[in-house]
Image (cartoon, helix red, strand yellow):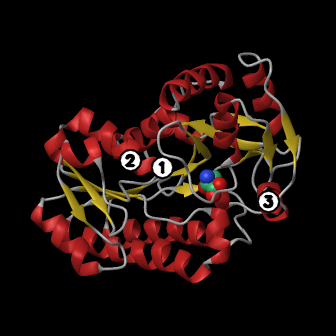
Amino acid sequence: MNMILVIGSTGQIGSELTRKLRSIYGNANVVAGYIKGAEPKGELAEAGPMAECDVTNPQMIANVVKKYNIDTIYNLAALLSVVAESKPRLAWKIGIDGLWNILEVARECGCAVFTPSSIGSFGLSTPKMLTPQDTIQRPRTIYGVSKVTTELLSDYYFNKYGVDTRAVRYPGVISYMTPPGGGTTDYAVDIYYSAVRGEKFVCPIKEGTLMDMIYMPDALKAAINIMEADPTRLVHRNAFNIASLSFGPETVFAAIKKYKPEFEMVYDVDPLKQSIAESWPDRMDDSCARNEWDWCPTYDLDTMTKDMLEKLTIKLK
Ligand code: AKB
């Protein structure tokens, strides 16, 4: 029987992952971990257990894990790339000191741990097209530095202590439920909101700037499938490239225009976001994930666009 703790359960990925895990493993078996000021509300709070679980407080993590007999931790606590640049110490404190606290509890209590990495773990010296699984990782953002460290620390705990750590490198995640906060790829979510609101979209990323993206249902599927994968097949662990979509602003704009012919977009490039975007891959090679745990995304740009527009139209009514 799985008993799961989602740390960061009210964030962009955490809120939807908690719901999905509850639908698979049962409401009572998934604890929504949160920090003060970001408490779960509505169905997330009512459907299953919830517990304050601040990654910077090791005793609090240990108490929650012991109280609920947790065997699997999904650690989604992190600052995204743009906001981390303005709060580098906090980004490190949450991303790395927090992960260390979780891994220590996992070592003591025998938990498996999922801590996502990102396309942000790559840098300018990484091959941009079909970025290999094992390649140069010299990012210049604090977000990237902390993601590479996340990967290494997670591997360290697996190799040294046998903690069952596994992860994926997330592309920009697109969803209609909880908005992302402070990422470089946020424009790919914001553009859908503008389209549904009937507003002109002001794009902060230059035409022709490719980045990997993924629709939320596929992002959730990746997190769950990697944790359920047969460990004897895993050559890699922290963290797998997962590719799904790769596009620049003009391509997602054209995909939306097919359903919203009146939609307009102009560019007003944000220098920080643009420089981060240019340091990330155009498209990752995800063949290791496909070979080692049968990764296969479901959505393409058109099916995602149709779904995003339909769901956001209902949500924003
Ligand atoms: C960000 O833009 O910071 C994130 C990411 C790609 O990791 N969405």
Secondary structure beneath label 1: helix
Say left or right for 214 vs 10: right
- Above or below, comparing residue 148 to residue 180 in the picture: below
Whether residue 3 appears in this view of the structure is yes
| First reached walking from the N terminus: tag 3 or tag 1 | 1
Q: Amino acid at mark 2?
A: Ser
Q: Considering the image in quadrants, where does the N terminus appear?
A: top left
**Res. 43 image quadrant:** top left
Q: Residue at x 80, y 21 (%)?
A: 262
Image mark count: 3
Q: Amino acid at mark 1?
A: Gln
Mark 2 C-beta closer than 8 Å to ligand 1: no
Distance from label 3 to label 1 (Cα)? Answer: 23 Å
Mark identifier at residue 279: 3
Quadrant of the image where one finds ligand 1? bottom right
Callout in the foreground (3, 1): 1
| Residue 110 percent location from the top left of the image | 21, 64
Distance from label 2 to label 1 (Cα)? Answer: 6 Å
Secondary structure beneath label 2: helix
Q: Amino acid at mark 3?
A: Ser
Callout in the foreground (2, 3): 2
| First reached walking from the N terminus: tag 2 or tag 3 | 2
